[in-house]
Amino acid sequence: MLLLKLFLFFSFFSSTFSHDLHPLPRPLIIQYPEGIETHFHEFDDELKSQCTSWRFAVEANNLSPWKTIPEECLGYVKDYMTGRGYEMDLERVSKEAGVYANTLELSGDGKYVWIFDIDETLLSNLPYYVEHGYGLEIFDPIEFDKWVQRGTAPAIEPSLQLYEKVLDLGFKIFLLTGRNEQHRSITIENLTKAGFRRWDKLILRNAFSYPAGIVVTDVNRGLIPVTIVLCRGREHHGKLATVFKSEKRSEMVEEGYRILGNSGDQWSDLPGAAASSRSFKLLNPMYYIP
C-alpha cells in the first residue's frame, strides 16, 4: 500500500510541474545532408574552372569584344592580379623576351627597334583598378585621366628588367601608347620616376580636337579655365588601337627602321601592318582595347 501511495504522489507531482515549468529550449541541431561539403567544393572548383577558362580565352584573343569582366569572376580576377600567379606570368614573358633579344645580332646602323606599350606593359595601373573593381566597372575615361595625371603608376618590374636589357643591347626604344598627347609631360615624369631611362621616341595619340573657342577646365590640376583652340588630332580620335598602332609601325618601317621586338598587354598592340619579327604579350584580364 505504501508503494502505491508513493507512486500516486510522484505521478501527481510530475504532472503538476510539467504544466507550470518552462524548460530551457532544446539546442537547434542542423544536420546537412551527407556529402554537402563535397558539393560546396565542387561548386567552387567549377566556378574557378569557368573563370580560368574565360581568362585563357581572353589571353588567346578568342572572345568577342568585351567591356567588363564577368561578375562571378571578380574574386578570381582579384586573386590572380594580386597574387603570385600574375607576377610569375609577367616574369616568364620578360624572361622569354630577354632570351630572344640575346639571340639577335645588331649591326651598327642604329635602325633596330623594340616597341613597348606603356599601360600594363611598363607601368601598372593596378592601384587604380583595385578601386574600380578589377575591371568589373565600365571604363570611365574621365576617372582614368585623373589617375594618369597623378603620375604615380609603379613600374612593372619584369618589364623594367627587359627594358634595361634591350637598351643595353643597342636597340632603339620606341614607346607606342594609346595615351593622349595632352598626357605627354606627366607620362614622361611618371616613366622617369618609375626607373625607365632613355627612349628614342614617345608616340601618343594626338590631342582631341575641341571646337574653336571652347572653354576647357583642367580639373586635375585646378587651373583657371582657359580658352584653347586645337586644330590637330582628328586623324587619331576615334581610331581603333589596332589601326593607330599599325599605322605608326608602318611609318617606322618607311623611315628605315627594323622592328625586331614588340611588348604589349593588348592584342591590339601587336598584330597588324608592319608587325614585329616577334611579339610578346603581357597578361591582362582586366580590360580589352580593340
Image (cartoon, helix red, strand yellow):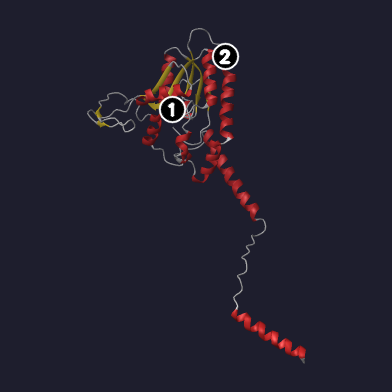
> For mark 2, does the 10 Å Cα neighbourhood hold few (<14), some (14 to 19), or many (20 or more) residues?
few
Q: Using residue 27 as the reference point, say whether residue 72 is left or right of it.
A: left
Mark sitting on residue 104:
2
Give the amino acid type for the residue marked by disc 2 in the picture.
Leu
Q: Residue furthest bottom?
A: 1
> For mark 1, does the 10 Å Cα neighbourhood hold few (<14), some (14 to 19), or many (20 or more) residues?
some
Give the residue drawn at x 59%, y 34%: 84
Give the residue drawn at x 63%, y 84%: 16
Q: Quadrant of the N terminus?
A: bottom right
Q: Is disc 2 placed on a helix, strand or loop?
A: loop
Mark sitting on residue 242:
1
Q: CA distance from mark 1 to mark 2?
A: 27 Å
Q: Is disc 1 placed on a helix, strand or loop?
A: helix
Across and down, in percent, residue 141 comes to 38, 35
- Is residue 10 shown above or below 161? below
Q: Is residue 278 visible?
A: no
